[in-house]
Image: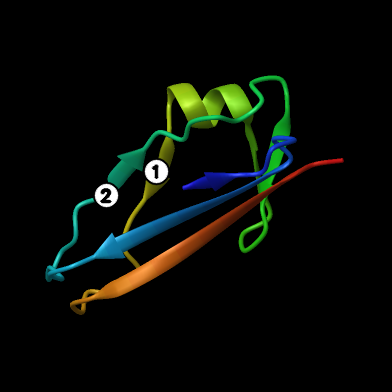
Amino acid sequence: MFVSPDQKEALLFTFVILGAVQPEPHITKLAGLDPQQTYVETDTNKMYGGDELMQLGLYTTPVQTSDYTAQVHYFKDKD
């Protein structure tokens, strides 16, 4: 995970080494965000509070069930 120095952008990478037929969802807690900021995940346009992402986490399910896949989640401040 990478967060910009001004805390306005964040990149989260998730990886699947060995795929599963019915993958389990994962909760990933992000770190280093501004708890007062609202972030938009650019692929889905869903909005999350910085405090929400750090304390509750991001609920993700692997999109593909094949081996050696990755997902990129890009968050940008709402303003």
Residue highlighted by disc 1 = 59
Choose between 40 and 3: the one closer to the eye. 3
Circle 1 — which element?
Answer: strand
- The mark tally for this picture is 2
Residue highlighted by disc 2 = 25
**Where is residue 14 shown, x and y percent of the image?**
36, 58
Snapshot quadrant of residue 74: bottom right
**Where is residue 32 shown, x and y percent of the image?**
55, 29
Measure how far apart labels 2 and 1 are at the Cα level.
7 Å
Q: Is residue 39 above or below residue 23?
A: above
- Identity of the amino acid at label 2? Pro
Is residue 45 shown left or right of residue 33?
A: right
**Mark 1 and mark 2 in contact (Cβ < 8 Å)?**
yes
Is residue 26 shown left or right of residue 41?
A: left
Circle 2 — which element?
Answer: loop
Q: Taking the image as drawn, is residue 64 in sight?
A: no
**Where is residue 33 shown, x and y percent of the image?**
60, 30
